[in-house]
Structure formats: C-alpha cells, structure tokens
Image (cartoon, rainbow, N blue to C red):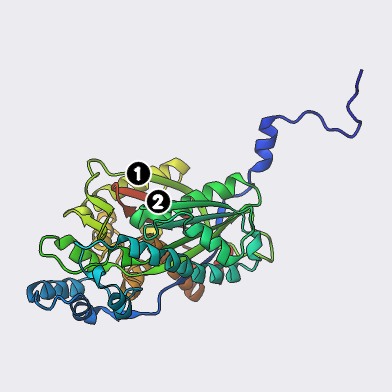
Amino acid sequence: MLMAPAHQAAATTTQDIRRAQRADGPATVLAIATANPETCISQDEYADFYFRVTNSEHLPQLKDKLKRICKKSGIENRFTYVNEEVLKAHPEFSDRKLSSLDARVEIASNAVPELAAAAASKAIAEWGRPATDITHLIFSTYSDLKAPSSDRRLASLLGLRHTVSRTILSLHGCYGGCRALQLAKELAENNRGARVLVACSEISLIAFHGPEECCLDNMVSHALFGDGSGAVIVGADPVDAVERPLFEMAFASQITAPDSEGAITVQHMKGGMDFHIARGVPEMLAGNIERCLAHAFDAVGVAARWKDLFWAVHPGGRRILDLIEEALGLDNGATAASRQVLREFGNMSGTTVIFVLNELCRRFVADGAKGEDWGALMAFGPGVTVEMILLRVASGLKGK
C-alpha cells in the first residue's frame, strides 16, 4: 500500500484555493496620472481654426453656430492631435463622404498607445514600484481599431512582463474609463497581490470631419471633445511604506436607462466615426441619477446624504453637470473638480473621469479631505449606460 509522504498536506479543496486567491481588503487606487497631446487650442479660437482647416469658410451660418456653442460650453482650452500638419497630409479627413478610415486607423494605432504610455509612465513613477510588478492591464479606447491593439503596444512601450494579463475595451465611449476601473476592482479583489494598470487614451481624429448642415449634433461634438490619456494603478492590500492608498473602491454598478438604446450612438464608417446624441440626454441622465445612487448605497447598506459626498462626475457637458446638481440638490461647487477639468481640457470621452479623479486628489492634497469620506465616481455613455463606483478617501490622502 502506497503512503503519502509525511510532509504532504491534507487534500486541498477548490474552495480552499479560491479563498487563498482573494485579497483581504478592498481594491484601492494607488496612483493616477494624465497626459495630453502637444497642440492646445483656445475655445475662443476653435471655430476659426476648424472652418479654416476644413476649407469651410463658405458656410458662415454654421461657423456662427459653432461659435455660439463654444461660448456656452464652459470650456476654455482643449488639446488635440488634429492640427494643420495632419490635415495637410490627409485632406480627405475633412470630407466624411471620402474613404479615410484606413488612414485614420493607421495613425491611431501608433498615436493612441503612445499617448497612453505618457500617462502610464507617470503613474508607475508615482506608484513607486517597477513596471514589471504590473500583473494586469486594462485598456479602454474608441480610437484604435487594429489587432494586436493598443494594449499590446502599450505593454511593449512600458516593458511589462510577458505574463501580464491584457484586456481591451472598445466603443464604450464616455463611460469607458469607469468601466475599466470597475473591472480593475474585480481583478484586484479576486487575485491576491494583483496590480492592475488601467489605461484610457482617446484622440478625436477618428471622428474629425468638416461641418455638415444636416448633422448639427456632430457640430456639438466638435465643440466639446478633446484628446487625452489617463492611467490608474489599482490593487488591494497596499504594501506599507511603499504604496500610497488614495481611494478605496467600495462598490461598483452599471445601470442602463430605460428606453434609451438610440439616444447615444457611435459607428465607424468609411469616412471615420459617426457620432450622434439625441436631444434630451442631459435630462434623461438627471432623471435617473438618484435611482442609480440609491441602488449603489443600498447595496452596501450605507445611508448617505448626497450633499455630504465628494463627486467625480464625467463632465459630458456643462448642462449635464447643472442638471445633476439640481436633481440631487447639491450645493454650488459640488462638482467643481469636474467643471475644472471640462474648462481646461473639454470632454475627452472615457479618459475624462481619470482627469477628474486626479483633480480631486490634487484638491485633497492641497486642502485636506475636510472629513469627506464617501464619494461617487460616475460616467455616462452609449446605452444609455450609467457607470458608478462608490469611493472612500484612503489613508494616503487623509491628514495631508
């Protein structure tokens, strides 16, 4: 009769293995960084720039309309990959009727991961551990349509190890960053020792084209969208004296607004990405936001007053922020971090919430957390989808 070696432990169950795989504490934001392209355009000058580079000066009424939209946008500056040099090399980008998708994708396949690397390198430096300690990479973008995609290229640019587990998210639009953070939370909490790099990078070149009288919602998008990248490192059970916990991620949810499937649409076509947003979307979001918040806080058994929370809201536009503040009865200034990002950078799609989270960090470091403990990070996009993550200020920001 064969006997098991004396040193061999008793049979291990799958449940034992599962328990050993899980982290002890909640997922925590450990580092945040952002980056933008070099070209910065003043919102006051954008209409003149846009109609000049697209050879559309023969449409003065549309130009005046864009100027009015820009003036009301709450935006002062935007950064963009699209400049006169790019459009001089590719005049077809200005006419959506011409086939230009191949050229756009070729440019984006290099520009998108390179912009992401600029933010991710800064996040890794802030984190304080080597890039080879990253175990998972989640990359969100609507701008890159090739495979291998931006996640593979970014891993190479950063020198991540070959065993890093990569996930690419595409076409989530303005809720892409929040979706990526929710997945990072799940990975960090279910894989002991995991360190997840979330990278979002968007260049609006994929959707850039000249003005059209028949598509005024595209005119709105040209008045709002900018380019940028953001990176966040997420992990559970921070290593003392090495990692600085910024925010604990307590709960995450996704809710789809009823009867909203066609309200926000995105489609890649031969002339680039076609973007449409229906009238009434800001009102739709404001009408559903309290239900989404109540669902999240009920799930964790926490009674919260909306006025007591800190807010990291995707600034899809100034009206969205105005209506959400009104719907929740928030004090003036509650969404100040979101408005600051909108003012300085515009709407950078899914990347924008990372900029807002970074701005909140900056404010907490400068002014202290002021007892603010619970907060809500939220973003909205096609679906109409509402993504939400409940946050708590962690020890790395308290008392600073």
Please provide percent x and percent y for residue 117. Answer: 51, 68
Q: Is residue 10 visible?
A: yes
Q: Nearer the viewer, residue 304 or 145?
A: 145
Distance from label 1 to label 2 (Cα)?
8 Å
When the figure is inspected, residue 313 is found, relative to residue 263, above or below; the finding is below
**Dot 2 lies on which element?**
strand
Q: Quadrant of the C terminus?
A: bottom right
Residue 67 sits in which quadrant? Answer: bottom left
Q: Quadrant of residue 310?
A: bottom left
Instruction: Report the amino acid beneath label 1.
Output: Ile
Quick check: marks 1 and 2 in contact, CB under 8 Å? yes
Q: Residue at x 27, y 74 (%)?
A: 75
Q: Is residue 151 left or right of residue 297?
A: right
Where 49 sits versus 266, above or below? below
In the rendered structure, find residue 255 and report the number of the disc placed on it. Answer: 1
Residue that mark 2 sits on? 388
Of the pair 24 and 47, the residue shown nearer to us? 47
Horizontal and vertical percent for residue 241?
A: 69, 66
**How busy is the neighbourhood of tag 2: few (under 14 within 10 Å), some, or many (20 plus)?**
many
Q: Quadrant of residue 379?
A: bottom left
- Tell me the element at label 1: strand
Q: Which residue is pictured at 52% across the width and 62% down the height?
A: 153
Tell which circle, 1 or 2, labels the residue nearer the N-terminal end.
1
* Residue 201 higher or lower than 5, as above or below: below
Q: Position of residue 332 (x, y in %)?
A: 29, 67
Q: Nearer the viewer, residue 206 or 263?
A: 206
In the picture, the quarter occupied by the N terminus is: top right
The amino acid beneath tag 2 is Met
Q: Position of residue 214 (x, y in %)?
A: 11, 60
**Quick check: 334 left or right of 17?**
left
Residue 385, disc: none
